[in-house]
Amino acid sequence: MDRMLLGSILQRNARDPGLKCKTALIFGNRSLTYGELNAQSNRIANGLLSLGVRKGDRIGVLSRNSDVYVAVYFALAKAGAIMVPVNFWYRSREIRYTLQQSGARGLIYQSRFGDVVGGIGVLTGLEWTLTIGNNCGNRLEDLAARSTSDEPAVELDENDPHIILYTSGTTGFPKGAVFSHKSHYLQALSLALSTGGHSADVGLVVYPLFHTGGPDCLVLPHFLTGAALVILDGADPGDILSAVAQHRATNIFCVPTVWRWILARQRLRNHDVSSVQRCLGSSDTFPAALLEDILATFESDVYVTYGLTEAGCILTVCRLASGDLGKLGSVGRPMASVELDVVNSSGNPVAPGEVGEVVAKTASAMYEYWNMPEKTGEALKKGWLHTGDLGRLDDDGYLYLSGRAKDVIISGGENIYPLEIERLLKENPKIRDAAVVGIPDREWGESVLAAVVASDGADLTPCEVADYVRARLAGFKKPKWVEIIPELPVTTATGKVRKAALRERFRAKYGTA
């Protein structure tokens, strides 16, 4: 087998007589064969090299989903640069942090984000920018058009880093998980094997491509098997079901929230979904009723997965089929490339059925947090990735999640870290104290509740608090509910906020799960 370089996937498919002229990618009314996509990626890579991009340079990418995004992904891998995907919901301050912390040398961004990029100000080390999709300035399209489609002449090793994926922790500061070519290659190979992927598949990309769920759960596994992909820019259920019918999609991979939207839409319109063979989902635990609804609606297998960014994406897979619900409620067994265990606070394995922290050993895992050695040491111990999630294993090795040890809110598949919002709220002179918790939400899984204490004499309203956050952070982090209370509940001994008490206090008032 060739070295496990991500660029070699396209290169190999473009040379294969049976795949070269096969459609690899569809976006809107545009489609690219494997030969065309490989050539486009090479032109972008060679153009970037002509700008002086060197192996190991970090390059930020800020764009909505598109065929161009996929080409840039592989172009950076072929050029030996390290891609830094930027969440397109971010505001200027969040983008600035991502680029600064990674030491990005360049930024490629879709022209629609010109205003938010302009708001980040001058960044030390950021030498150039390229735009996608406008008719002025330094355009990526122009750079690619005047560059060769030959394979870039860059010496690469499969252990070279290729991407930094930012994922926050309970400290509130986003951490950049670094992955090699090999780690994501193995992850994709394992996922394709675990779900029975093959070249006749047509996958639907609903996840944002800045998210590990886009490239690692969809793009790479499908391209490794020579399958086709349909890229969607958004999770509109009507668009998803129309794309399934038009392109005869076989695989749909969504978070539970989007699955609920799809099922509701299907009940109204009854689209042709006869082509679907696999319904896949991740990001949080699927309620049994939702899984049964998917199985009843689609004549296909359902795959429940569990993973996290630091793991390279997926750790476990559970296959369910109509009439075979024996492990309903489980997130499955470890994939072929994963060794998984559940341990106590001392790091020792617990007995089957006992709850502990989920830990994993896999070559697909990150090998560090960028420039955060202390945080790396906390997450990676003696070769094991400590997930911070709680679970139990049954006698057959199937994992059942029990909760999250980390204080993370998962809303619609997006991780929300309370301390980041709390710090921002406390910057407001009208707010003396604040605590943020997740409240069960039938549609989103969880939604954000902010409990705030107003400064003495301050006139503060819930709408004002929500708008304050919305103007400064991504929209999905905005509190859905705001409670202005006299004091936060704290522990007597340490003065720590009793978030469990806040959750219980407001669960009955707002919770819909």
Image: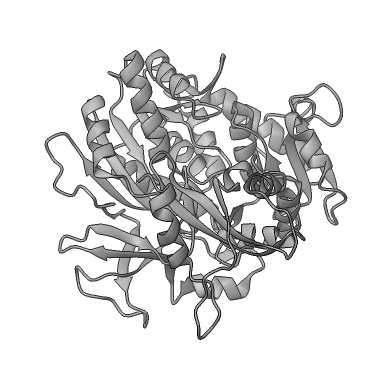
Q: Position of residue 39 (x, y in %)?
A: 63, 28
- Residue that extends furthest to the bottom in the rendered view of this protein: 493
Count up the numbered dots: 0
Q: Residue at x 58, y 27 (%)?
A: 37
Q: Is residue 201 visible?
A: no
Q: Is residue 192 left or right of residue 411?
A: left
Front residue of 291 and 7? 291
Location of residue 153 (image quadrant):
top right
Front residue of 439 and 417? 439
Q: Is residue 53 visible?
A: yes
Q: Residue at x 23, y 50 (%)?
A: 329
Q: Position of residue 489 (x, y in %)?
A: 52, 71
Front residue of 130 and 291? 291
Front residue of 267 and 119? 267
Location of residue 424 (image quadrant):
bottom right
Q: Position of residue 483 (x, y in %)?
A: 56, 54
Q: Residue at x 58, y 68 (%)?
A: 487
Q: How is the image coloured?
A: one colour
Location of residue 175 (image quadrant):
bottom right
Q: Position of residue 242 (x, y in %)?
A: 42, 16
Please tell me whether residue 103 is drawn above or below residue 81 in the rendered image: below
Q: Is residue 184 left or right of residue 142?
A: left
